[in-house]
């Protein structure tokens, strides 16, 4: 197995072995603490432009099953693991993680100390990195420091659909317009299981396009990158508020919050894992959530008719907002995460009840 290096922009060097295809991969290095779900993470559009480090020590032990994918391609620029399992053991497995990366033409590295990488990121914050096979550390670092920063790119434009389309099974009881900032398939699956027909729109769609289908509800999807670069989307979402019940998830939560006057900021190392405790500020109920985001909402400036509906109990960051005057609900976490805690799938039930109430129960 060929030797490879992970080089971070602070000069740290982690030697390992190459997996996946030959080549280089550059991106913002982040870590996820979940023990399962590596394929779902690899196909999550919210990881676009990043090098995904998985803290669980063995990855790939239950193989690959394309039925669980959250999008049509691997989204991170590269994968970093302690050990890539050589053998996969699962009835539905279609191969190993290494073969999967090769088939999808993605660069990876194994044999690195992922605990040390995680500690460095926790101490110093996320930073750019590169996985490389054909460079000395000094040359890789020089090239890396000349790259644009992760926050300088509008990553939503790289993952959104290029045309509107109807998700499978378009004969549901409720019509949902979904603005795609980097949607995961399980959001549409979760809506479909609740009698919703979903039409997915590109992220740059004007509000009029979504409203033209006379939706019973509107969903703002998760997605990658800095929400402060999405001024056009924020302006169009402002025009959607009050026109139909609205649910914002992760990036969609951040966009809706900005439309309501709030700000956003970058977290030191983000929230990525399946064990984040979140409290409902109205009921006091605490649930365990799956999360994948590097930015958070600053509630200062939030419209007077809005309030913080959920908070993260680890760091008190805003995990949801709601309106007192309109049917609007947003969440920072992934209620559709699979695998992941199922505590929060009821968010979709609340959204359906909002649509039923807005339609007067006639649907």
Image (cartoon, rainbow, N blue to C red):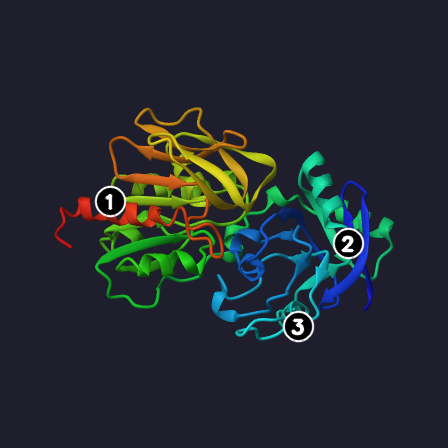
SS category of the residue bearing label 2:
loop
Q: Position of residue 190 (x, y in %)?
A: 36, 57
**Residue for badge 2:** 112
N-term-proximal mark, 1 vs 2: 2
168 above or below 82?
below
Classify residue 50 as left or right of residue 350: right
Classify residue 34 as left or right of residue 67: right
Neighbourhood count class around disc 2 (C-alpha, 10 Å): few under 14, some 14–19, many 20 upward: many
Asked if marks 1 and 2 touch (Cβ < 8 Å), the reply is no
Q: Can the viewer see residue 332?
A: no
Neighbourhood count class around disc 3 (C-alpha, 10 Å): few under 14, some 14–19, many 20 upward: some
**Residue for badge 1:** 354
Q: Residue at x 35, y 28 (%)?
A: 307
Label 1 vs label 2, nearer the camera: 2
67 above or below 325?
below
Q: Position of residue 151 (x, y in %)?
A: 60, 42
40 above or below 261?
below
- Between marks 1 and 2, how big is the CA–CA gap? 48 Å
**Residue for badge 3:** 99
Choose between 317 and 203: the one closer to the eye.
317
Choose between 76 and 1: the one closer to the eye.
1
Q: Residue at x 64, y 57 (%)?
A: 77
Q: Position of residue 6 (x, y in %)?
A: 77, 53
């Amino acid at each position: 197995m060929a030797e490879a290096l992970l080089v971070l922009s602070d000069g740290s060097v982690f030697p390992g072995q190459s997996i996946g295809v030959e080549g280089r991969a550059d991106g913002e290095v982040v870590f996820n603490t979940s023990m399962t779900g590596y394929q779902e993470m690899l196909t999550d559009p919210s990881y676009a432009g990043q090098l995904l480090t998985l803290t669980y020590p063995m990855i790939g032990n239950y193989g690959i099953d394309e039925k669980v994918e959250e999008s049509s391609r691997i989204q991170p620029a590269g994968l970093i693991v302690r050990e890539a399992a050589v053998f996969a053991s699962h009835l539905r497995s279609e191969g190993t993680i290494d073969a999967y990366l090769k088939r999808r033409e993605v660069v990876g590295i194994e044999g690195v100390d992922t605990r040390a990488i995680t500690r460095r990121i926790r101490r110093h914050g996320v930073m750019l990195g590169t996985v490389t096979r054909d460079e000395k550390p000094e040359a890789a670092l020089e090239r890396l420091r000349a790259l644009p920063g992760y926050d300088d790119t509008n990553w939503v434009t790289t993952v959104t659909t290029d045309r509107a389309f109807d998700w499978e099974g378009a004969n549901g009881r409720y019509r949902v317009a979904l603005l795609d900032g980097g949607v995961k398939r399980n959001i549409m699956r979760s809506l479909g299981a609740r009698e919703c027909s979903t039409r997915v729109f590109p992220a740059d769609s004007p509000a009029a396009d979504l409203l033209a289908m006379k939706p019973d509800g509107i969903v703002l999807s998760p997605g990658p990158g800095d929400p402060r670069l999405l001024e056009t989307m924020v302006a169009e979402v402002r025009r959607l508020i009050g026109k139909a019940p609205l649910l914002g998830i992760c990036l969609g939560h951040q966009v809706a919050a900005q439309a309501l006057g709030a700000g956003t900021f970058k977290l030191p190392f983000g929230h990525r894992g399946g064990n984040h405790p979140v409290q409902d500020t109205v009921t006091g109920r605490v649930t365990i959530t799956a999360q994948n985001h590097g930015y958070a909402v600053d509630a200062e400036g939030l419209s007077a008719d809005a309030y913080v509906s959920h908070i993260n109990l680890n760091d008190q960051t805003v995990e949801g907002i709601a309106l007192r005057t309109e049917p609007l609900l947003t969440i920072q976490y992934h209620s559709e995460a699979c695998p992941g805690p199922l505590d929060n799938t009821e968010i979709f039930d609340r959204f359906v009840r909002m649509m039923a109430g807005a339609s007067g129960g006639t649907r």
